[in-house]
Image (tube, rainbow, N blue to C red):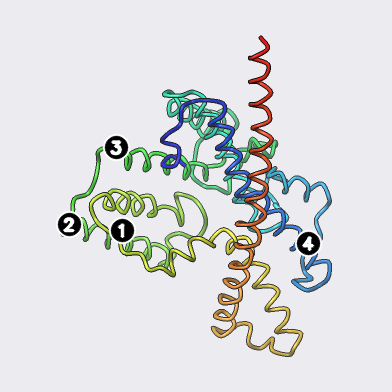
Amino acid sequence: MVYTTTACDGSIRYTASFLIKRFARVWPVYVVAVLADLLLARMHLISTAKVFPPLLAILKSLVFIPIDASKAPFFDTPYDVGWTLNFELYFYLVFGLSMLFGRHRWKALSTWFVFTLVAIPLIASGHVGLDVRQNYGITHAYIALISNPIVWEFAVGVVIARLYLGSMYLPRHPVTYVLIVSTIVFAAWYDFTWHGTFNGLDQWGAPLPLALLVLALASKRVHFQVPAVLVWLGGISYSLYLFHPLASEGLQSLMSAVSLGRLIPTWWCAAAVTVFAIAIASIANVLLEDGLSTWVRHRLFAFLDSFDRRDSRSANRS
Protein backbone atom coordinates (compact mmCIF):
# COMPACT_ATOMS: atom_id res chain seq x y z
CA MET A 1 0.00 0.00 0.00
CA VAL A 2 2.87 2.38 0.74
CA TYR A 3 4.56 1.50 -2.55
CA THR A 4 1.42 1.87 -4.65
CA THR A 5 0.47 5.27 -3.19
CA THR A 6 3.73 7.13 -3.72
CA ALA A 7 1.86 9.51 -6.08
CA CYS A 8 -0.59 10.49 -3.32
CA ASP A 9 -1.43 14.19 -3.54
CA GLY A 10 -3.47 14.40 -0.33
CA SER A 11 -6.72 15.05 -2.18
CA ILE A 12 -10.12 13.66 -1.31
CA ARG A 13 -10.37 12.27 -4.86
CA TYR A 14 -7.14 10.29 -4.51
CA THR A 15 -8.21 8.90 -1.13
CA ALA A 16 -11.66 7.99 -2.43
CA SER A 17 -10.10 6.25 -5.44
CA PHE A 18 -7.76 4.29 -3.18
CA LEU A 19 -10.61 3.14 -0.93
CA ILE A 20 -12.81 2.21 -3.88
CA LYS A 21 -10.05 0.07 -5.40
CA ARG A 22 -9.36 -1.74 -2.13
CA PHE A 23 -13.04 -2.24 -1.28
CA ALA A 24 -13.88 -3.53 -4.77
CA ARG A 25 -10.87 -5.84 -4.66
CA VAL A 26 -11.80 -7.44 -1.33
CA TRP A 27 -15.54 -7.20 -0.61
CA PRO A 28 -17.37 -8.79 -3.61
CA VAL A 29 -15.30 -11.97 -3.60
CA TYR A 30 -15.58 -12.26 0.17
CA VAL A 31 -19.38 -11.93 0.06
CA VAL A 32 -19.60 -14.74 -2.49
CA ALA A 33 -17.34 -16.94 -0.34
CA VAL A 34 -19.43 -16.33 2.80
CA LEU A 35 -22.73 -16.98 1.01
CA ALA A 36 -21.30 -20.10 -0.63
CA ASP A 37 -20.18 -21.37 2.77
CA LEU A 38 -23.62 -20.77 4.29
CA LEU A 39 -25.39 -22.38 1.34
CA LEU A 40 -23.18 -25.47 1.25
CA ALA A 41 -23.46 -25.89 5.02
CA ARG A 42 -27.25 -25.62 4.81
CA MET A 43 -27.26 -28.24 2.05
CA HIS A 44 -24.94 -30.46 4.15
CA LEU A 45 -22.38 -30.53 1.35
CA ILE A 46 -19.65 -29.44 3.76
CA SER A 47 -19.08 -30.04 7.47
CA THR A 48 -22.38 -30.52 9.27
CA ALA A 49 -20.62 -29.87 12.60
CA LYS A 50 -20.80 -26.14 11.96
CA VAL A 51 -23.34 -24.15 13.94
CA PHE A 52 -25.32 -21.93 11.58
CA PRO A 53 -24.55 -18.37 12.74
CA PRO A 54 -27.21 -15.82 13.72
CA LEU A 55 -28.30 -13.41 11.00
CA LEU A 56 -26.79 -10.43 12.85
CA ALA A 57 -23.40 -12.15 12.98
CA ILE A 58 -23.57 -12.84 9.25
CA LEU A 59 -24.45 -9.22 8.47
CA LYS A 60 -21.67 -7.92 10.71
CA SER A 61 -19.15 -10.21 9.04
CA LEU A 62 -20.20 -8.94 5.61
CA VAL A 63 -19.29 -5.37 6.64
CA PHE A 64 -16.13 -6.45 8.50
CA ILE A 65 -17.36 -5.80 12.03
CA PRO A 66 -15.96 -8.22 14.65
CA ILE A 67 -18.53 -10.17 16.64
CA ASP A 68 -17.15 -11.03 20.09
CA ALA A 69 -14.54 -8.80 21.74
CA SER A 70 -13.47 -11.59 24.11
CA LYS A 71 -12.33 -13.92 21.30
CA ALA A 72 -9.33 -12.12 19.81
CA PRO A 73 -7.97 -12.21 17.19
CA PHE A 74 -10.71 -14.14 15.36
CA PHE A 75 -13.56 -12.33 17.15
CA ASP A 76 -15.96 -15.18 16.35
CA THR A 77 -16.19 -14.34 12.63
CA PRO A 78 -18.65 -16.83 11.06
CA TYR A 79 -16.52 -17.65 8.00
CA ASP A 80 -13.22 -18.93 9.37
CA VAL A 81 -10.75 -17.02 7.20
CA GLY A 82 -12.77 -13.79 7.27
CA TRP A 83 -11.16 -12.59 10.49
CA THR A 84 -8.05 -11.35 8.69
CA LEU A 85 -10.17 -9.18 6.40
CA ASN A 86 -11.57 -7.34 9.43
CA PHE A 87 -8.01 -6.17 10.11
CA GLU A 88 -7.20 -5.62 6.45
CA LEU A 89 -10.18 -3.36 5.77
CA TYR A 90 -9.51 -1.47 8.99
CA PHE A 91 -5.95 -0.84 7.83
CA TYR A 92 -7.11 0.32 4.42
CA LEU A 93 -9.48 2.77 6.08
CA VAL A 94 -6.95 4.38 8.42
CA PHE A 95 -4.24 4.25 5.75
CA GLY A 96 -6.56 5.97 3.29
CA LEU A 97 -7.62 8.64 5.77
CA SER A 98 -3.98 9.33 6.64
CA MET A 99 -3.38 10.28 2.99
CA LEU A 100 -5.64 13.30 3.50
CA PHE A 101 -2.86 14.79 5.64
CA GLY A 102 -0.63 15.14 2.57
CA ARG A 103 3.06 15.35 3.42
CA HIS A 104 2.19 14.76 7.07
CA ARG A 105 0.51 11.42 6.32
CA TRP A 106 3.16 9.30 8.03
CA LYS A 107 3.02 11.43 11.16
CA ALA A 108 -0.76 11.09 11.21
CA LEU A 109 -0.62 7.32 10.70
CA SER A 110 2.09 6.90 13.33
CA THR A 111 0.13 8.98 15.82
CA TRP A 112 -2.95 6.85 15.24
CA PHE A 113 -1.00 3.61 15.73
CA VAL A 114 0.55 4.92 18.95
CA PHE A 115 -2.87 5.94 20.23
CA THR A 116 -4.62 2.66 19.36
CA LEU A 117 -1.80 0.18 20.03
CA VAL A 118 -0.18 1.83 23.04
CA ALA A 119 -2.46 4.42 24.67
CA ILE A 120 -5.71 2.42 24.53
CA PRO A 121 -4.14 -0.77 25.97
CA LEU A 122 -2.44 1.21 28.73
CA ILE A 123 -5.68 2.99 29.63
CA ALA A 124 -7.70 -0.22 29.51
CA SER A 125 -5.35 -2.63 31.26
CA GLY A 126 -2.15 -0.87 32.29
CA HIS A 127 0.09 -2.86 29.98
CA VAL A 128 1.02 -3.36 26.32
CA GLY A 129 1.94 -6.70 24.76
CA LEU A 130 2.32 -8.63 21.52
CA ASP A 131 0.02 -11.55 22.34
CA VAL A 132 -2.76 -11.26 19.76
CA ARG A 133 -5.09 -13.38 21.90
CA GLN A 134 -5.36 -10.75 24.61
CA ASN A 135 -8.05 -8.07 24.53
CA TYR A 136 -6.95 -5.85 27.44
CA GLY A 137 -10.40 -6.25 29.00
CA ILE A 138 -12.00 -4.14 26.26
CA THR A 139 -15.67 -5.01 25.76
CA HIS A 140 -16.35 -3.11 22.53
CA ALA A 141 -15.49 -5.46 19.67
CA TYR A 142 -14.20 -2.88 17.20
CA ILE A 143 -12.02 -1.12 19.78
CA ALA A 144 -10.66 -4.55 20.69
CA LEU A 145 -9.83 -5.06 17.02
CA ILE A 146 -8.04 -1.75 16.42
CA SER A 147 -5.99 -2.18 19.60
CA ASN A 148 -5.06 -5.81 18.90
CA PRO A 149 -1.28 -6.31 18.66
CA ILE A 150 -1.56 -8.00 15.27
CA VAL A 151 -2.01 -4.50 13.81
CA TRP A 152 1.69 -3.96 14.58
CA GLU A 153 2.37 -6.12 11.53
CA PHE A 154 0.80 -3.45 9.30
CA ALA A 155 2.91 -0.79 11.02
CA VAL A 156 6.08 -2.83 10.49
CA GLY A 157 5.14 -3.25 6.83
CA VAL A 158 4.83 0.52 6.47
CA VAL A 159 8.29 1.03 7.99
CA ILE A 160 9.88 -1.57 5.69
CA ALA A 161 8.25 0.02 2.64
CA ARG A 162 9.51 3.45 3.67
CA LEU A 163 13.03 2.06 3.98
CA TYR A 164 12.69 0.40 0.58
CA LEU A 165 11.57 3.64 -1.06
CA GLY A 166 14.47 5.49 0.52
CA SER A 167 18.14 5.38 -0.40
CA MET A 168 18.95 2.26 1.62
CA TYR A 169 19.83 -0.92 -0.29
CA LEU A 170 21.87 -4.11 -0.04
CA PRO A 171 24.63 -4.37 -2.67
CA ARG A 172 25.13 -7.26 -5.06
CA HIS A 173 27.68 -8.92 -2.82
CA PRO A 174 28.22 -12.43 -1.40
CA VAL A 175 27.29 -11.13 2.05
CA THR A 176 23.89 -10.09 0.71
CA TYR A 177 23.24 -13.58 -0.65
CA VAL A 178 24.23 -15.03 2.71
CA LEU A 179 21.77 -12.66 4.41
CA ILE A 180 18.98 -13.68 2.02
CA VAL A 181 19.51 -17.40 2.58
CA SER A 182 20.01 -16.94 6.33
CA THR A 183 16.79 -15.02 6.90
CA ILE A 184 14.74 -17.52 4.86
CA VAL A 185 16.33 -20.49 6.66
CA PHE A 186 15.78 -18.78 10.01
CA ALA A 187 12.09 -18.25 9.22
CA ALA A 188 11.68 -21.90 8.21
CA TRP A 189 13.61 -23.13 11.26
CA TYR A 190 11.57 -20.89 13.56
CA ASP A 191 8.34 -22.36 12.24
CA PHE A 192 9.25 -26.04 11.96
CA THR A 193 10.89 -26.13 15.41
CA TRP A 194 7.66 -24.80 16.95
CA HIS A 195 9.17 -21.60 18.33
CA GLY A 196 6.06 -19.96 16.96
CA THR A 197 2.68 -21.61 17.51
CA PHE A 198 0.21 -18.84 16.69
CA ASN A 199 -0.26 -15.55 14.86
CA GLY A 200 1.56 -12.36 15.79
CA LEU A 201 5.00 -10.78 15.86
CA ASP A 202 5.90 -12.77 18.98
CA GLN A 203 4.93 -16.07 17.32
CA TRP A 204 4.91 -17.11 13.64
CA GLY A 205 5.46 -13.52 12.55
CA ALA A 206 8.66 -12.98 14.53
CA PRO A 207 11.26 -13.78 11.81
CA LEU A 208 9.25 -12.49 8.85
CA PRO A 209 9.89 -8.72 9.05
CA LEU A 210 13.63 -9.38 8.92
CA ALA A 211 13.25 -11.65 5.87
CA LEU A 212 11.00 -9.13 4.13
CA LEU A 213 13.38 -6.25 4.85
CA VAL A 214 16.42 -8.14 3.55
CA LEU A 215 14.61 -9.30 0.40
CA ALA A 216 13.19 -5.83 -0.28
CA LEU A 217 16.51 -4.03 0.11
CA ALA A 218 18.39 -6.70 -1.84
CA SER A 219 15.90 -6.54 -4.72
CA LYS A 220 17.10 -3.00 -5.48
CA ARG A 221 20.40 -4.45 -6.70
CA VAL A 222 19.83 -8.20 -7.03
CA HIS A 223 17.57 -9.58 -9.78
CA PHE A 224 15.27 -12.35 -8.53
CA GLN A 225 14.08 -14.74 -11.24
CA VAL A 226 10.60 -15.75 -10.08
CA PRO A 227 9.11 -18.86 -11.75
CA ALA A 228 6.01 -18.06 -13.79
CA VAL A 229 3.92 -20.59 -11.88
CA LEU A 230 4.59 -18.74 -8.61
CA VAL A 231 3.62 -15.44 -10.23
CA TRP A 232 0.38 -17.09 -11.38
CA LEU A 233 -0.30 -18.50 -7.91
CA GLY A 234 0.29 -15.05 -6.49
CA GLY A 235 -2.30 -13.70 -8.90
CA ILE A 236 -4.97 -16.10 -7.66
CA SER A 237 -3.83 -16.05 -4.02
CA TYR A 238 -6.80 -14.03 -2.72
CA SER A 239 -9.33 -16.44 -4.22
CA LEU A 240 -7.21 -19.35 -3.03
CA TYR A 241 -7.21 -17.95 0.50
CA LEU A 242 -10.97 -17.41 0.54
CA PHE A 243 -12.10 -20.63 -1.12
CA HIS A 244 -9.59 -23.20 0.11
CA PRO A 245 -11.68 -24.05 3.22
CA LEU A 246 -14.71 -24.75 1.02
CA ALA A 247 -12.62 -26.81 -1.39
CA SER A 248 -11.10 -28.81 1.46
CA GLU A 249 -14.35 -29.49 3.30
CA GLY A 250 -16.28 -30.14 0.11
CA LEU A 251 -13.79 -32.68 -1.24
CA GLN A 252 -13.51 -34.46 2.09
CA SER A 253 -17.29 -34.64 2.39
CA LEU A 254 -17.44 -36.12 -1.11
CA MET A 255 -14.77 -38.68 -0.23
CA SER A 256 -16.74 -39.72 2.84
CA ALA A 257 -19.92 -40.02 0.78
CA VAL A 258 -18.28 -42.42 -1.68
CA SER A 259 -16.67 -44.54 1.06
CA LEU A 260 -13.19 -43.07 0.66
CA GLY A 261 -13.10 -41.49 4.10
CA ARG A 262 -10.14 -43.68 5.07
CA LEU A 263 -7.98 -41.65 2.68
CA ILE A 264 -8.71 -38.30 4.34
CA PRO A 265 -5.83 -38.42 6.87
CA THR A 266 -3.25 -39.23 4.14
CA TRP A 267 -0.89 -37.28 1.91
CA TRP A 268 -2.96 -38.40 -1.09
CA CYS A 269 -5.91 -36.42 0.25
CA ALA A 270 -3.68 -33.44 1.03
CA ALA A 271 -2.43 -33.43 -2.57
CA ALA A 272 -5.96 -33.80 -3.96
CA VAL A 273 -7.27 -30.97 -1.77
CA THR A 274 -4.41 -28.72 -2.88
CA VAL A 275 -5.07 -29.35 -6.58
CA PHE A 276 -8.83 -28.97 -6.12
CA ALA A 277 -8.44 -25.73 -4.14
CA ILE A 278 -6.16 -24.25 -6.81
CA ALA A 279 -8.64 -25.22 -9.52
CA ILE A 280 -11.52 -23.58 -7.64
CA ALA A 281 -9.39 -20.49 -6.98
CA SER A 282 -8.43 -20.13 -10.64
CA ILE A 283 -12.11 -20.18 -11.63
CA ALA A 284 -13.03 -17.74 -8.87
CA ASN A 285 -10.20 -15.46 -9.95
CA VAL A 286 -11.61 -15.18 -13.46
CA LEU A 287 -15.30 -14.97 -12.56
CA LEU A 288 -15.11 -12.96 -9.34
CA GLU A 289 -11.86 -11.01 -9.17
CA ASP A 290 -11.57 -10.22 -12.87
CA GLY A 291 -15.34 -10.18 -13.37
CA LEU A 292 -17.46 -9.20 -10.37
CA SER A 293 -14.85 -7.08 -8.58
CA THR A 294 -14.03 -5.19 -11.77
CA TRP A 295 -17.73 -4.49 -12.34
CA VAL A 296 -18.17 -3.21 -8.77
CA ARG A 297 -15.10 -0.99 -9.12
CA HIS A 298 -16.41 0.52 -12.36
CA ARG A 299 -19.82 1.19 -10.78
CA LEU A 300 -18.26 2.86 -7.74
CA PHE A 301 -16.01 5.02 -9.89
CA ALA A 302 -19.00 6.01 -12.02
CA PHE A 303 -20.75 7.06 -8.81
CA LEU A 304 -17.70 9.05 -7.73
CA ASP A 305 -17.47 10.71 -11.15
CA SER A 306 -21.11 11.78 -10.88
CA PHE A 307 -20.22 13.76 -7.76
CA ASP A 308 -17.31 15.40 -9.56
CA ARG A 309 -19.57 16.42 -12.46
CA ARG A 310 -22.16 17.77 -10.02
CA ASP A 311 -19.51 19.82 -8.20
CA SER A 312 -18.19 21.09 -11.54
CA ARG A 313 -21.65 22.25 -12.63
CA SER A 314 -22.18 23.96 -9.27
CA ALA A 315 -18.85 25.77 -9.61
CA ASN A 316 -19.70 26.91 -13.12
CA ARG A 317 -23.06 28.32 -12.01
CA SER A 318 -21.33 30.16 -9.19
Q: Which residue is mark 4?
A: 38
* Residue found 59% across the figure and 73% down from its top: 279
Q: Which residue is mark 1?
A: 183
Q: Amino acid at mark 2?
A: Val
First in sequence: mark 2 vs mark 3: 3
Q: Amino acid at mark 3?
A: Gly
Q: Quadrant of residue 177?
A: bottom left
Q: Amino acid at mark 4?
A: Leu
* Residue found 49% across the figure and 23% down from its top: 101
Determine whether the residue tagged by mark 3 lies in a helix, strand or loop: loop
Residue 19 is situated, as x and y percent measured from the top left of the image, at 59, 38
First in sequence: mark 2 vs mark 1: 2
Q: Quadrant of residue 243?
A: bottom right
Q: In this rendering, would 30 be left or right of 270?
A: right
Mark 3 surroundings within 10 Å by alpha-carbon count, few (fewer than 14), some (14 through 19), many (20 or more): few
Determine whether the residue tagged by mark 2 lies in a helix, strand or loop: helix
How many numbered badges does the structure rendering display? Answer: 4
Extreme-top residue of the structure: 318
How far, Cα to Cα, is label 2 from label 3?
21 Å
First in sequence: mark 1 vs mark 3: 3
